[in-house]
Structure formats: C-alpha cells, structure tokens
Image (cartoon, rainbow, N blue to C red):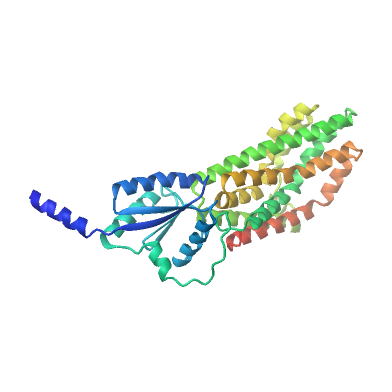
Amino acid sequence: MKGKFLLLLLISSVFAYNVTAYFFWGQGCPHCAKEEPFLEQMEAKYPEFHAERFEIYRNTTNRALFKRTAEAYNTTIQGVPTLFIGNKVIVGWDPRGIFGEPTPKAIENTIKECITYGCPSPGEKIENATFVTTKEVSPVEGVNLLSLVSAVIAGSAVDAINPCAFAVLIILLTTILVAGDRFRVLKAGIAFSLAIFISYFLMGLGLFSAIQWAGATRTIYYIVGALAVVVGLLNIKDYLRYGGGGFVMEVPQSWRPTLKRIIKSVTSAPGAFFIGFIVSLFLLPCTSGPYIVVLGLLARRATQALAIMLLLLYNAIFILPMLFITFMVYKGLSPERVEKWRKGKLRHLHLVAGIIILGLGIALLMGVL
C-alpha cells in the first residue's frame, strides 16, 4: 500500500506543470501589501508556482508591461493589486469575499488547477497576442494624473459653492459683529474655516482608508458613480423645483434651530474654532456627496501619498469662499448683504453643483476617469 502511494506521488510530481504568474503592485498600496505575503505562502506550499513581481508606480517599464499584459488578456487596467495567472485576471484583495469569491481561495484554486492541467504563462500570452497600441501607462494605475486632479478640483468646486457652508459662516460672522470688533470677526472667520478644513481632511482620510480596506474594486467604483449621478440630479431638482418632495440638498430643516443656537453661542476665535468641528457634522448631509465621490475615485486610482496631497488641495479649495467672505466682512461688507446674495443665487448654485457632479458621475460610469 505504501509503495502504491509513493508511486502515485512520483507520477504526480513528474506530470505536475510549472505555473508562472505576473503580480502587479504599487508602492504604498495597502491591499498589495496584504496579497504579497499570501503569494509567498503559495510559493512555499506549491514549489511549481512562482509569481513574478512588478512595481508600477515608480517603474515606467513595469507600467508598460502592465498595459501589454492586460491587452494580451483582452482586458483593461483596473488598478492594483492585479494577478495574471493562467487564463485568469484577479484584481484587488478581498479575503472575506464581499464582492464574490474570496481572493485567497480564487488564487489557490487557480494554482492547483494550473499545476494539474497546465496553463499558459502571461509571457506566452503576450508573445501570442496582437497589440494595437503601445501607449504609455500613467503612473497612477493607468489613469492620467491631470484628469484625476481635474476631478478633485471639480468636486471641491461643487462643495465650495455649497449654500449650506455660506449660511453657517454668515450666521457666525453676524453674531460676532454685534460686538462691533471687525478684527475679532476676521480671527473668528479664519479659525472657523481652519477647523472645517482640518475636520473634513481627517474625515476624508479616514473614509479613504476605509474604502481601500474594504477593497477598492470596480463594483465600488460604479456605486460611487451612481451616487454622483443621484446627487447631481437632486441638485438640479432643487433648481427646477426648490423644496419639491419636501427634500433639499441642504442641512435638514429639523437640524437648523439647534445649529443656529450652537453658532450664536460663539463670541471668540477659539470658540469659532471649536464650533467649526461640531458644525462640520451638521454640514455632512449637504456637502458629503461630492466628497464621497472624489474619495471613491482616489481610493481606486491614487496612492496614499498622492491621495493626501489631493485631499489637502480639495479642502483648501473648499474653504476658499469662506475665507473670502470673512475678509470682505472684515473690510466692511455687511453679512446681511452676503446673505441676501446667497438667497438670491440659491437655486443657481444648486444648478451649477448639480451639473458638475452629474458630469463626474457619468464620467466615472463610462470609465473616462
């Protein structure tokens, strides 16, 4: 019996096929860092298996190979980590199987199948493929950096012209101006804007990490695109029929009395800074739409370092109108006049925001971004 087992083991080892995979990853990519140790485990468990590693963020040659390999597999670059093995393309790292078969199980099953029956290597598929183009791949997972920055600027512009933030700032400045000290108004406005900047940046960084941890797959990408379309249409609805259906893309009516009481309690710059963090939570229902869309885009297309820089840019643009209004009130502009302008342009602000965010959503769903 023992002899038969050894004979079967010998036969299986003789007829086992070697398996080569291509693993494309990026420096700073959290899911890549999780898949790499698993591949090492598979190489130790299955001596016939070997994964060749290619870092694409900093290596232009590897980026070009990534594109050629994707073309050989009749697919497009969807981000990293990406594993090409046999005839399969396994994108992302989803160990719990939230969006389908768990990634570790899919990889190991493919390895065993290829060892038993044989599979073409990525190199062989590239040799046998016909390439239409050899255009260079962008360093950010196949996406042009300019289009990524443009999307961030567009999203932040939508938030920057949001009437919710204007209304809150005007109430704050009016309250402090009662004391008759315009320099105090300037300090309070800057402190409030800085608090909004810090709180939104930290919230954005947390959501970015959460989306990446969950797995920035194409499914999430489509969900974010669909969300942008819905938010855009709701803003356009507020232009066509403000308050129609009892719902507007602003702070809920039931929250506003509490919000006003909190703001009117402020009499100093430190108080404005502290209140800014609290108020940022009240503003989420009307400002989170564009932010979540941009965060979904960054989680799929950007490294953590690049995402941090773009989040800083986003929030700097977001608070620019607040700083401008603060400065103008300091120079003598009446807050009541600013509020009158805000109310007069309210519907048009919703229209502009709706068109921009709707365009972003369509671009995401069509794969332009």
Q: Is residue 330 left or right of residue 260?
A: right
* The quadrant where residue 140 appears: bottom right
Foreground of the two, 86 or 366:
86
Residue 34: x, y in percent?
44, 44
Residue 269: x, y in percent?
79, 28
* The quadrant where residue 37 appears: top left
Where is 267 relative to 206, above or below? above
The C terminus - image quarter: bottom right
Residue 335 in view: no
Q: Residue at x 66, y 50 (%)?
A: 290
Where is 104 relative to 65, above or below? above
Where is 192 relative to 21, above or below? above
Residue 235: x, y in percent?
70, 54
Residue 114 in view: yes
Residue 45: x, y in percent?
29, 47
Q: Residue at x 87, y 38 (%)?
A: 329
Q: Is residue 289 left or right of residue 47?
A: right
Q: Is residue 209 left or right of residue 177?
A: left
Q: Outermost residue toward the right?
A: 332
Total numbered badges shown on the rendered structure: 0
Foreground of the two, 172 or 66:
66
* The quadrant where residue 203 appears: top right
Where is 53 relative to 324, above or below? below
